[in-house]
Image (cartoon, grey):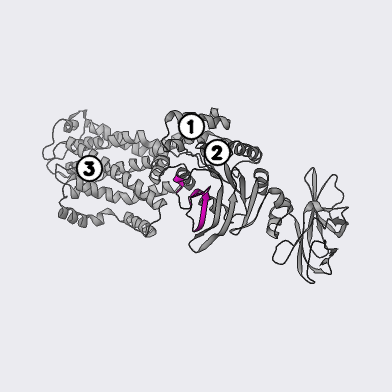
């Protein structure tokens, strides 16, 4: 393998292009640990006062830790549901023959093209009817359902790249259809599973509209809703606090992304020729 | 174990791929299913191993009817064209897979994998992954995985098609040797007549879903039953000329010679003559005249195309020095006794 050399001109170009974003994050960080006059861009003094929400509840907004826990549960549940259902449904759509398969694929795609906001009123009414309104479970189910079409298509695409002959060889070697899927096919689309997990985790972590409308009470509140609540609170015009919570909200995603970004780009080298 | 296909048929929806095919493969024999692409040879193979369901007829392994058994219930080893190795498993795990799925004790698995790896001279590869192997090594792994379970039947679907030329030659004799050693009844699917001729005891030549002829490589070459067999077997292929029979003579534009005694024809009957390139030589008895329109030296041998006045092209293969050049008018001869004659249906007379 060739040693990777740094391409300096390219690196500098990319640095310049991404500078606005980097500067924004840096600004966000500095703002969150400083006191600032409204008419100035230079910090007046450094303080940890903006991070007080970590240790004490903000009046009228509840604990940030409840919201964090809720968001974690929300995102991981969405990942679990989406990955389990997409990886099985994708296999069926890629490999099995059943009536209305093509129509099913078409419908799934159609669902994906719906902006979820247009469905929000009917979803709201449905959740009210089955008693899941203002619960974490309700909003998890809704988010997972809305993420599924995308997941199913991604997984189907990955399954389509696995050669049929591998499955035939598996059957020939004595494995059942389920063993073939579980032991031979699934391991080969792990990059797809990883990518889908990461995508749906991010989607879950950053979801705002659904929980805002479907789970507004403080018990079921997510971080995004918590953050928005701080911004629209007329009695609490504390932008420092808002920025600190915002940073708090974005840090887990950044760390998560740092560790998983190679998985997103990883392309598996296969043992099948031709 | 003897394999017997009894009136085997296979169709996909309305498309009949194979109709009423009968074929018996003796115990320990290696047979080639040879034919152009789309002739149904791979379909036949998949039916034998159980991946395709049979539409009609029966398949027997020995005296056991295996027609409707799923692949898991048949002890069949298959080498696929793409090798179909499991890329996420090591070579050892690949070979061990069929044993492990049968829940063999791990000590036995280890012993059997080592044993087959020894037979195929690949002990040092066991820790690697398929992606790190060359084409020939992948081929060996695929063969080992098929053989490790001691199958009743070994099926190979174009096993050499993905290898480069030199390796193909080497693996040809290697596979043949291993097949002899294990004594495993084998079917080789191929479109390459040289492969079929050099590796197999017998050849079943197929075209359009039907077996055209079954026989030893020698029989296929020297006793073709019809025009298709004669033209498919042999490289370079033989040359044809269409004509009619008149008073015991073959007559065509620019060609006129006496038919051999063994050929019985009615006057005016359409006859096609087929001549293998080695039976057209400068000093052969039945004269044939024309212009040299193509010369190709292959080193040891030289190919000539002789175009007759009637436009028919006859190919000749000769060893030694080049004796004439492009555009020469020459008079050579064919061996009419060794030529094949076909009637209007294409059957050999």
Numbered mark located on residue B210 in the image: none
Decide which of A119, B279 is in the foreground and name it: B279
Rate crowding at label 1 as few (under 14), some (14 to 19) or many (20 or more) other CA atoms within 10 Å.
many
**Which residue lies at the image location 76% right of the left edge and 70% below the top edge?**
B269
Magenta includes A64?
Answer: no
Both on one chain, marks 1 and 3?
no
Mark 1 sits on what residue? B92
Disc 1/disc 3 C-alpha distance (Å): 50 Å
Q: Mark 3, chain letter? A: A
Do the residues under discs 1 and 2 have CB atoms within 8 angstroms? no
Q: The N terminus of chain B lies in which quarter of the figure? A: top right
In the displayed structure, A106 sits above or below A88; it is below
Q: Is residue A239 visible?
A: no
Q: CA distance from mark 1 to mark 2?
A: 13 Å
Q: Which residue is mark 3?
A: A224
Q: Which residue is mark 2?
A: B143
Asked whether residue B60 is drawn in magenta, I would say yes
In the image, what residue occupies the spot 13% across and 36% down? A58
Q: CA distance from mark 3 to mark 2?
A: 57 Å
| Location of residue B239 by image quarter | bottom right
Q: Nearer the viewer, residue B315 or B186?
A: B186
Q: Quadrant of residue A185?
A: top left
Residue sitting at x 29%, y 55%: A115
Q: Residue B332: percent from the left, percent from the top?
A: 87, 56
Protein chain holding label 1: B
Disc 3 packing (10 Å; few <14; some 14–19; many ≥20):
many
């Amino acid at each position: 393998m060739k040693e990777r050399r740094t391409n300096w001109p390219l690196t500098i170009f990319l640095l310049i292009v991404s500078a606005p974003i980097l500067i924004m994050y840096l600004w966000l960080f500095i703002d969150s640990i400083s006191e600032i006059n409204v008419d100035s861009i230079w910090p007046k003094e450094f303080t940890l006062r903006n991070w007080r929400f970590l240790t004490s509840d903000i009046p009228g907004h509840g604990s940030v830790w409840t919201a964090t826990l809720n968001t974690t549960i929300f995102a991981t549940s969405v990942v679990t549901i989406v990955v389990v259902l997409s990886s099985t449904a994708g296999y069926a759509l890629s490999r099995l023959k059943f009536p209305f398969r093509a129509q099913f694929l078409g419908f799934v795609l159609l669902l994906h093209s719906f902006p979820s906001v247009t469905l929000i009123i009917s979803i709201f009414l449905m959740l009210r009817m089955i008693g899941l309104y203002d619960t974490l479970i309700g909003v998890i189910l809704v988010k997972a359902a809305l993420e599924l079409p995308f997941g199913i298509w991604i997984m189907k695409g990955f399954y389509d790249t696995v050669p049929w002959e591998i499955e035939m060889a598996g059957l020939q070697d004595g494995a059942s259809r389920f063993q073939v899927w579980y032991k031979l096919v699934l391991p080969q689309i792990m990059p797809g599973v990883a990518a889908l997990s990461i995508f749906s985790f991010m989607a879950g972590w950053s979801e705002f509209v659904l929980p805002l409308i479907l789970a507004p009470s403080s018990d079921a509140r997510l971080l995004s809703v918590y953050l928005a609540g701080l911004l629209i609170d007329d009695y609490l015009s504390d932008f420092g606090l808002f920025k600190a919570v915002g940073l708090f909200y974005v840090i887990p995603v950044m760390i998560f992304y740092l560790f998983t970004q190679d998985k997103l780009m990883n392309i598996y080298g296969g043992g099948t020729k031709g | 174990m003897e394999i017997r296909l009894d009136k085997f048929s296979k169709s996909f929806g309305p498309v009949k791929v194979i109709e009423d095919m009968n074929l018996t493969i003796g115990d320990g024999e290696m047979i080639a299913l040879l034919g152009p692409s789309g002739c149904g040879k791979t379909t036949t193979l998949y039916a034998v191993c159980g991946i395709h369901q049979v539409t009609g007829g029966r398949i027997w392994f020995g005296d056991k009817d295996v027609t409707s058994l799923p692949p898991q219930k048949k002890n069949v080893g298959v080498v696929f064209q793409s090798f179909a190795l499991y890329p996420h498993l090591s070579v050892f795990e690949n070979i061990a897979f069929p044993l492990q799925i049968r829940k063999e004790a791990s000590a036995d698995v280890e012993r059997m994998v080592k044993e087959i790896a020894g037979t195929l001279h690949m002990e040092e590869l066991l820790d690697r992954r398929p992606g790190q192997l060359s084409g020939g090594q992948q081929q060996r792994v695929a063969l080992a995985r098929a053989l490790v379970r001691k199958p009743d039947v070994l099926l190979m679907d174009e096993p050499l098609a993905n290898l480069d030329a030199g390796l193909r030659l080497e693996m040809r004799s290697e596979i043949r040797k291993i097949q002899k050693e294990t004594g495993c009844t084998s079917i080789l699917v191929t479109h390459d007549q040289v492969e079929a001729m050099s590796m197999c005891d017998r050849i079943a030549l197929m075209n359009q879903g039907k077996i055209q002829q079954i026989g030893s490589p020698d029989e296929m070459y020297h006793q073709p039953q019809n025009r298709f067999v004669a033209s498919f077997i042999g490289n370079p292929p033989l040359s044809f000329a269409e004509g009619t029979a008149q008073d015991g003579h073959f007559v065509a534009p620019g060609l006129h010679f006496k038919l051999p005694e063994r050929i019985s024809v009615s006057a005016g009957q359409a006859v096609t003559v087929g001549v293998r390139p080695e039976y057209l030589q400068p000093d052969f008895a039945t004269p044939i005249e024309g212009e040299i329109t193509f010369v190709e030296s292959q080193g040891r041998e030289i190919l000539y195309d002789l175009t007759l006045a009637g436009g028919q092209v006859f190919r000749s293969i000769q060893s030694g020095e080049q004796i004439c050049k492009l555009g020469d008018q020459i008079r050579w001869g064919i061996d009419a006794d060794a030529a094949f004659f076909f009637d209007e249906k294409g059957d050999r007379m």
